[in-house]
Amino acid sequence: TQLLEQSPQFLSIQEGENLTVYCNSSSVFSSLQWYRQEPGEGPVLLVTVVTGGEVKKLKRLTFQFGDARKDSSLHITAAQPGDTGLYLCAGAVINAGKSTFGDGTTLTVKP
Amino acid sequence: EAGVAQSPRYKIIEKRQSVAFWCNPISGHATLYWYQQILGQGPKLLIQFQNNGVVDDSQLPKDRFSAERLKGVDSTLKIQPAKLEDSAVYLCASRSLRSGTGSTRTYGYTFGSGTRLTVV
């Protein structure tokens, strides 16, 4: 059983479109991170959210943590080819010192 | 600051052979992790160190995998003997643990570029 479910698994869109990807769980997290991973590289941290209902913006990326701290979403506005990659969410369960990763959403943005 | 260093970047071995991976975390990061990432999946934790002690190795296949961090800095992960299903990217990560008021927050990992292992 996967602790974190990410959807969709694959997403292919045209440059300029908007998109949202989701990260869902039945567990409550003390913090949740989003990463982007490009082929041949390790994941790179984009953001950490810690407070229920929190919204963080990073240029064209908007991250939201659910009120109950069980889910999160990532919204990209006006996607660009440089946004192409594997987007991973990872959650740290309360009182645990490690994070569990979802299987990611593979995003392809076509020029 | 320098990132997490891993070597080698690529390794191809035959099944039943042995292989070792090396990781040097970010200076000052006490916590070090080894993750296995199979193609099409997210990273799965193999082992977590705090300084030179093992915190969690519950998902490490101990009959064939071993890891050490003798001086609390760099770490090695070994597989002996390798199986076909061990083909994956092995990622090392380190983390800065920060304390907040009345609670401890954990923040994101810094990953190395990984070692891509192919077992044939």
Image (cartoon, helix red, strand yellow):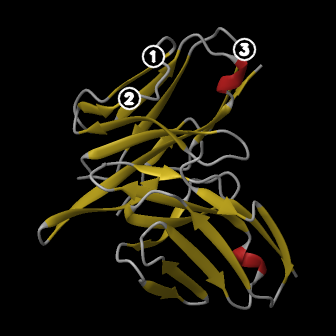
Report the side of A12 relative to B103 (left or right).
right
- To the question of a shared chain for discs 1 and 2, the answer is yes
Q: What secondary structure is marked by label 2?
A: loop
Which numbered disc, 2 or 3, marks the residue closer to the eye? 2
Of labels 3 and 1, earlier in sequence is 3
Residue B81: x and y, percent?
59, 10
B14 versus A87 height, above or below: above
- Determine the CA span between mark 3 and mark 1: 20 Å
Q: Chain of mark 2?
A: B
Residue labelled with disc 3: B14
* A7 sits left or right of B36 in the view: right
Q: Amino acid at mark 1?
A: Lys
Q: Position of residue B93 (x, y in %)?
A: 43, 48
Q: Quadrant of residue A77?
A: bottom right
Q: Point out the frontmost of discs 3 and 1.
A: 1
Disc 3 residue type? Answer: Glu
Residue at image coords 11%, 68%: B102
Mark earlier in primary sequence (2, 3): 3
Against B45, residue B54 (above or below) is above
Picture coordinates of residue A66 (x, y %)?
48, 76
Q: Residue at x 64, y 52 (%)?
A: A103
Residue beneath disc 2: B57
- Of B13 and B65, nearer the camera is B65
Mark 3: few, some, or many residues within 10 Å (few <14, many ≥20)? some
| Dot 2 alpha-carbon crowd within 10 angstroms: few under 14, some 14 to 19, many 20 or more | some
Mark 1 to mark 2 CA distance (whole Å): 9 Å
Separation (CA) of disc 2 from disc 3:
26 Å
